[in-house]
Image (cartoon, helix red, strand yellow):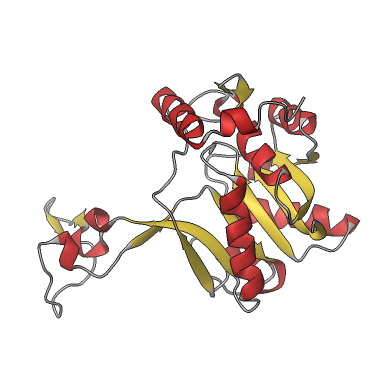
Amino acid sequence: MKRTDIVALIIGRGNNTLKNKNILNVLSRPLLEWPAIAAKRSKYIGRYYISSDCESILEAGKKVGYENIKRPLWLAEPTSQSSDVVKHAYETISRKDEAKIIIVFHANVGTISTEMIDDCIEIHLRNPMSSAVIPSHYKNEYHPYRAKKINKDGELEPFIDLSNKKVSANRQDLEGCLFFDHSFWVLSVERGIKSKVGQPPWPVMGNSIIPYITEGCFDVHEYEDLLRTEKWIKEKGLDVIYKNEGY
């Protein structure tokens, strides 16, 4: 059953390296429309918002039923922090009605299905003490034990102190290392967004984060990512399922 206290929030700014990436066409739809429709088909999400500094992005969201949140310029810079954007949007959302769970969608990610969204919401509902449920994927080839940094002599050294650790050169021997997809985040308002402490660099996720294991996503930064997104959507059959959705 749809609930007005479970809210979708799309975030995306207009000043990107790939111009207008959030509204570039993917299978004849603006990119951000794919996560927008996936969220609208959720059996839980009852309200829909989009936050941006860009009128074109806001208009694209409005066409598929998302209320606009115009963010201030200080939240529209390349250095702006996504957690601050979420907190600003929450203030607007909460003035209209109570929100207990906010699902944050990144406007440049189209590789999201309704099934994934509802799975993550259900995980959170079954674990009410969790602060967030985040799609995550294993990537041991980028394990922190393998990471390097350049020292003052211009040479590489371990990024973290490994002096007291025995580290295998085989990635399969290493403890599983996960990275967030950053496709969407299911956030508890009380334990995540409003929490005074949270895991950096995304404190709105809080400290009790449950992973939802995926194979990763294609967040769009280059034109090639659009093609990969199209392929994924077709493989999942979403182009057919969503054919009559939107405007």
Q: Residue furthest right?
A: 96
The image shows residue 159, relative to residue 236, as above or below, that is below
Q: Nearer the viewer, residue 87 or 111?
A: 111
Q: Quadrant of the C terminus?
A: top right
Decide if residue 67 is on the left or right side of residue 215: right
Decide if residue 219 is on the left or right side of residue 95: left
- Could you say where residue 229 lies in the image, as x and y percent from the top left? 47, 31
* Image quadrant in which you'd find residue 205: bottom right
Res 82 seen here: no
Identify the residue at horizontal 18%, vertical 63% (top origin). 172
Decide if residue 209 is on the left or right side of residue 102: left
Res 113 seen here: yes
- Could you say where residue 199 lies in the image, as x and y percent from the top left? 50, 69
Identify the residue at horizontal 9%, vertical 62% (top origin). 169
- Could you say where residue 224 lies in the image, as x and y percent from the top left? 39, 25
Q: Nearer the viewer, residue 24 or 45?
A: 45
Identify the residue at horizontal 72%, vertical 30% (top origin). 245
The image shows residue 46, relative to residue 76, as above or below, that is below
The image shows residue 76, relative to residue 198, as above or below, that is above
The image shows residue 239, relative to residue 28, as above or below, that is below
Q: Quadrant of the N terminus?
A: bottom right
The total number of labels drawn is 0
Decide if residue 23 is on the left or right side of residue 158: right
- Could you say where residue 216 lies in the image, as x and y percent from the top left? 41, 48
Identify the residue at horizontal 62%, vertical 69% (top origin). 124
